[in-house]
Amino acid sequence: MPEPIYHPWGTVTPEFWATPDAGTAPPPSGLTPAVLRAGLVKVAGIAGDGHLGDAAALAARIDQDATVEFGELDLLTIQVREVRGYLAALAGDHSSGLSWYLHAAQLRVTVQGPGHPDVEAATRRAYSLWRAVPPEPDRQRLGAALLTVATDIHGADSPLVRHIRGRLYDCAVPLPSSAVASASSSARVGGT
């Protein structure tokens, strides 16, 4: 039996597929970019007060509203999803946080293109979050996901991907401290 796939938007219910009656449109949500930004400021305040669960719940609600109002491929929606990743990371859920960051990077490349500086910055944020993951079994799996997305976005030979690949290799094959000292002294001896 295949393992279920969980998407960041949750489970699609039958109500999702229901079509509204002809001539009836949902009332406007009133979500403007200014209202959205004010909501994110409120999220930051709640998180700053130490109520990460409440901040995450409000960010999830803002994400739903932004997706309905602006669509998934809008930069405002993408920013909300990056906030959700940041909140998950603050709460210690590195796996969810990195998943949100990688999801946002993939959306950004769709909207802005692979050469856009914001796309590279989004990938670097994901990399920075991955580096903060404590050494645990999940770290290698999360690093592999990061490498896959970064390679898809930037190409296998990009400097960023080569750097990520090198860090993954360093984590997978840690050198004993005596080997590091020996290698550095050999480098000095060979370099003189």
Image (spheres, grey):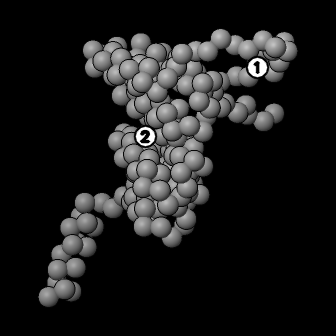
Task: Name the residue at 47% across, 56% down.
Answer: 116
Q: CA distance from mark 1 to mark 2?
A: 38 Å
**Tag 2: amino acid:** Glu
Residue 96, horizontal then vertical, whole percent: 50, 32
Give the structural element (helix, strand or loop) at label 2: loop
* Residue bearing mark 2: 136
Give the structural element (helix, strand or loop) at label 1: helix
Quarter residue 136 falls in: top left
Task: Name the residue at 59% across, 30% down.
Answer: 70
Q: Is residue 59 visible?
A: yes
**Residue 163 sits above or below residue 101 on the image:** below
Q: Is residue 145 visible?
A: no
**Tag 1: amino acid:** Phe
In the picture, the disc for residue 16 is: 1
Task: Name the residue at 42% across, 24% down.
Answer: 34
Q: Residues within 10 Å of mark 1 (few under 14, many from 20)?
A: few
**Residue 191 sits above or below residue 182 on the image:** below
**Residue 166 sits above or below residue 185 on the image:** above
Q: Residues within 10 Å of mark 2 (few under 14, many from 20)?
A: few
**Residue 23 sits above or below residue 74 on the image:** above
Q: Quadrant of the C terminus?
A: bottom left
78 and 8: which is toward the camera: 78
181 and 129: which is toward the camera: 129
